[in-house]
Image: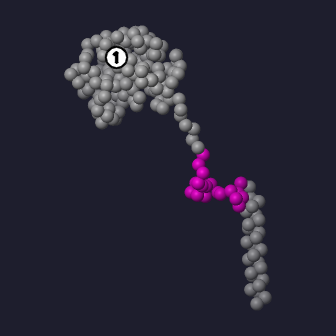
Amino acid sequence: MRSSTQRGLLGVVIVATTIALTGCAPGISPTTPTPSESASTSSTAIPLPTVTTRPVASAFPCAQPTPTGALPTPDELENYRAVIVSANTQPMSTHACETVTVIFSGSECCGPLDRDNALVQWGDWLGMKSDWNFSPDPALVAEWRTHAYAQYVPEGALIAVSDSGGVMTSVIFDGNVITGLFVATLEEMTF
């Protein structure tokens, strides 16, 4: 019996020594889970920073002027709709970046232009169109976002479609500043 008592005591000593040594091991403590345990059993997560100033990063960021809001206001959007209908782009000049990217799809025009030149070019194009619809089918816009011109119809862009003309245009923002103007035929949007 003596040998089984000795074995029992030896087992207790081994377990106690193991616990004591584990507590002294660098980086491991009885109260700190190992990396594999933390990944699978931790109930607290490190919070990720939240974006509060700009919900959608613009493909055409603006250096000057700096955006003062996360999005254009409803009144500003209404004014931009009126600009598209009238083709008078002057009211947009105070809300546009110093450099505006203008893209007329299917042509070599235009790229980054100074604000005034960009608005004149776009206004001339708008003057040849009519019957603008500012509520395009969401499924159609979602499809456009899977094709080659997706960067020109991002979330938050003002999109207008002229069904009789078979064309569309979009106003792209960096925060509340106009940074891009895009035009295309409806057919080109499916390429």
Residue sticking out furthest to the bottom:
1
What percent of the width, then of the height, locates residue 11? 74, 77
Residue sticking out furthest to the front:
75
Query: Which residue is disc 1 drawn over?
Result: 82
Instruction: Name the residue: 52% across, 16% down.
Output: 64
As drawn, is 167 to the left or to the right of 149? Answer: left
> How is the model colour-coded?
one colour
Instruction: Kindly report the secondary structure that dominates the magenta region of the rendered protein.
Output: loop
- Quadrant of the image for the C terminus? top left
- Quadrant of the image for the N terminus? bottom right
Residue 188 found in image quarter: top left
Instruction: Name the residue: 50% across, 29% down.
Output: 54
Could one spot residue 136 in this view of the protein?
yes
Instruction: Name the residue: 28% across, 21% down.
Output: 132
- The residues colored magenta run 27-46
Residue 155 found in image quarter: top left
Could you tell me which secondary element the residue under label 1 belongs to?
helix
What percent of the width, then of the height, locates residue 15? 73, 72
Residue 93 found in image quarter: top left
